[in-house]
Image (tube, rainbow, N blue to C red):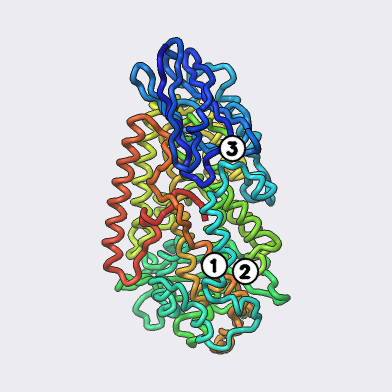
Amino acid sequence: MVEYEVTVFTGKLDLASTFDDVYIKLVGSDESPRTQIPRKWIPSLKDTESHLSISCPKSLGKLVLVELQKQNRFFEDSWHPAKVEVKSPEGHTYHFPVYHWITDNEVHYIREGTALTVFEDKCSVDGYSREEEIKKQQKVYCWDVYEEGIPHCLKADGLTSLPYDIRFSFTKYAEITYTATTGLIELELIQIAECKKNFTCIEDISRLSHVHQSVTSDYVQKHWKDDAFFGYQFLNGVNPILIRRCTALPDNFGVTDEMVFSNGQHNLAEEMKKGNIFLCDYKLLDGVQPNTISRKKQYLMAPLILLQKTSDNKLMPIAIQLKQKPAKDNPIFLPTDSEYDWLLAKIFVRSANFNFYEVSVHLLRTHLLAEVFTVSLLRNLPMVHPLYKLLMPHTRYTLQINVLARQLLISQTGVLTRFAASGGKGVITILQKSLSSLTYSSLCIPDDIAERGLKDVPNFYYRDDGLKLWEIIFRFVKEILTSYYKTDAEVQKDSELQNWIHDIYEHGFLSQASTGIPQKFTTVDEMIKFVTMVIFTCSAQHSAVNSGQYDFGAWMPNSPVTLQLPPPTKKGKASEKSMLDTFPDIQTTVHGMAVMWLLSKQSSDSIFLGQYPEEHFSEEVPCQKIKDFQVELKRLSAEIKARNSGLDLPYTYLDPEVIENSVSI
């Protein structure tokens, strides 16, 4: 007889243990007896180990999988094994990563931890095949259409219909529920949450944002009127992806030299040639139907903004047009106009920016795309596939948070529908228009920065940190994947990999070739770049456009969720009173603040970029590359902190220490 020493690890999640009977079988060229883990070894707590010996008449040869089966004793009781380790009589230790909720009485086949592509996998075991594993997953994870013209999503009837594997932990669910239900209390706004009166003075607004102020939110409140800060936010605020260098004015933006350079010291043609003129064009918002809130029509503009880089490296707005179509009642506002004409024009821009970034930049380009990447992964790749092992940490909580977003934010009773200018039909219109104009290159920060002509813009910390992060992630992905794919031919003949990318093209980008999204991978380099984009989108990009929402939005005048009056049609009419009347009412403001507070709040069980508490890889090469990745991220974090120590307003959102691995909030 030979002995196999087996250790079964229970997951680190609450309620991970089970009171059911659990059985294990080892499978190699032969099989062990089906063995019950003795009752005294059944874990009673999370993060525990169970040890047992399994006797076999002879060696089982190279182990390829273990079978786990749970049988109910008194009631249905789920179990979350983390991994199984087996020491063979020959002295070799096998690793079997599980990280999966077992809720039924079926046999679950857990492959040995060595990552294998479809053409490398020679496993032949009765009852198991890669194809059957994928078929089972495709029955669990199905595509659905929320609205035509936007990325497809996971089919789910509600939170309770979600598979256990993609649900929040007990800690995450408790914290997000608490924050959602007590946000107005935490912000000390509950007493005025239903007040539909307008603000009568700016001091009234000041009283709303005194709780939970950060360095950034305090800076925003002090500098929101400053032109330099207005320009700064296009580079380092929550929407750093719109601004581009301007080489020719749009035909519908009739700015003249006399308007912006009345002193005659500059002219637009020369400044454009020098690369000093920049454009922000919210044309995507043109034609979006504004919301009606408390039976009052709201207003959402589609502005154009022209900015100039000054000799002291500030980005200053020099002209604002609030509607796309030139007309007498659509004046071009200038810094030389009256204080409130110019300030109100900037306020309309900031409100347009909120609605644009919240729906297009944040919801579509991070949340909905991350969901597509995740569903396709779960439907097309078996657990033993190297890409499954690489990408699973970047899918954590994404599917449940998106189900919640559809229920609580953009549904007919959702917060955006009730309180944002783009709420209701507007959200869907923005999503549809955004997807139809989205390009692959805009999702890849090196290409995006180059296309927008922003390589040499000073004080652009989103670009500086983002490009460094992209390169670190790119090297990590390349080193991992090239250890499994040696040639382009191996990529081409991996049917599972090709199904993954094709599903993304079809269900995420609706088979629109104009997006430039690959329909298939033909080279190793194509695959590496795309996988880098997926990880960057799910981690760094989401942090850049999500984490600063409350910082930049707690002071409402800097980021109004909606506006109650139309913009001025003539100059010289705006005043402090008309500005206050234009702002959203108190109820709308405080609910907007509560949402931004919720969306900016990380949970205590967050897992940050580079952290891999689940050990999906077991081979030496990927395990070492993970350590190298962590070292590089730590070095970049130190660089960012050193840079920030000399800034009046630190840029922290792409510090690896605060970037979550996945879209989880």
Comparing labels 3 and 2, the label whose residue is closer to the camera: 2
Query: Mark 3 or mark 1, which is nearer the start of the sequence?
Result: 1
Most distant residue in the right direction: 295
Nearer the observer, 270 or 201: 201
Find the distance from the CA under tag 3 to the CA under tag 2: 33 Å
Task: Name the residue carrying label 1.
Answer: 354
Residue 508 on image: x %, y %: 59, 44
Nearer the observer, 17 or 631: 17
| Three-letter amino acid code at the position of disc 2 | Ala
Q: Is residue 590 above or below residue 171?
A: below
Residue 198 on image: x %, y %: 62, 84
Q: Are marks 2 and 1 in contact (CB under 8 Å)?
A: yes
- Quick check: 580 left or right of 265? right
Query: Mark 2 or mark 3, which is nearer the start of the sequence?
Result: 2
Task: Name the residue carrying label 3.
Answer: 503
Q: Is residue 384 above or below residue 231?
A: above
